[in-house]
Amino acid sequence: MSVTAGGATLLSRCLTLLSARGAVAAGCNRGLTVGARSVSMSQSRSRSSTQHVTAGKLARNGEEKKPVICVEGNIASGKTTCLEYFSKTSNIEILTEPISKWRNVRGHNPLALMYQDPERWGITLQTYIQLTMLDRHLSPVTSHPVKMMERSIFSAKYIFVENLFRSGKMPEVDHAVLSEWFDWITTNISIPVDLIVYLQTSPQTCHERLKQRCREEEKVIPLEYLESIHQLHEDWLIKGTSSPLPAPVLVIPADHDLQKMLQQYEENRDKILAAGCL
């Protein structure tokens, strides 16, 4: 049996987690809800925020003390802009989605293949995404006091895997295998998340932005796909009717132009960076 370099690295990380078991329970459970057009904090949860952080899980020494923020949203919702803003204005560790890895796995592009034929290549891409997102969550501790990630292993499963399955483009057996992997990971490994920042963007706005940025793999994405992804985000992060929330949710309307979005990030800086107390 051979193991890829990326898989071997992650396996090594999982093994070196063993010096500390258990993880901290979620911090303060406070939040606020304001007008529909302004920023809001959603606490509607189908299950406790400690769902993915329970005693007995493998955890890295000290990792639970470092606030982790996950920026979630549709394709072209503005996640990269958000991350770039905080990387330039705050002492914060930024972890972007490893898209370059998804485009080149030993010369193959599973991201492009999935968009071309999701029924054939969906499980291939999503298995690798699950691996690489876990790798992001388990990245070594740095000197930065806060970690901010683009998406998470949770949205990879709850949004993109579920969309493939519900749309009939992922066979039931593929979905079952991915679900078994995800359940094992979240049951046995501590993956703390302190805050989810949801960039709530209309599918129409995302579609226009997609056409402007002209990424090769995204040229085949129709509006209907973005509408499905949007609804899954709403069900999970706003209505709390689909999958458990690992953390409180801060909702930021993101249909605005760049200047307005930068203003909103500045207005919510303290709330976002104080994620460990939410």
Image: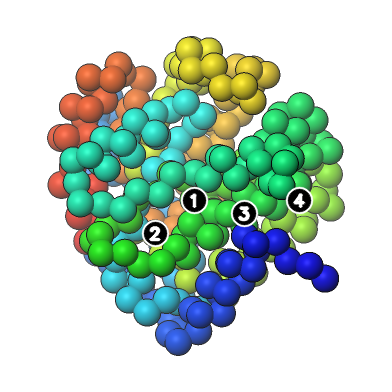
**Residue 137 to residue 41: above or below:** below
The amino acid beneath tag 4 is His
Q: Quadrant of residue 252?
A: top left
Q: Mark 3 and mark 4: span between their CA atoms?
A: 13 Å
Report if the CB atoms under discs 2 and 4 are less than 8 Å apart: no
Q: Mark 2 and mark 3: span between their CA atoms?
A: 16 Å
SS of the residue at dot 3?
Answer: helix
- Dot label at residue 175: 4
Report if the CB atoms under discs 1 and 2 are less than 8 Å apart: yes
Could you tell which of marks 1 and 3 lies nearer the N-terminus? 3
Q: Which residue is mark 1?
A: 152
SS of the residue at dot 2?
Answer: loop
The residue shown at (55%, 40%) is: 99
Could you tell which of marks 2 and 3 lies nearer the N-terminus? 3
The residue shown at (61%, 71%) is: 11
| Along the viewing direction, whichever of 42 and 7 lies nearer the viewer | 7
Q: Which residue is mark 2?
A: 193
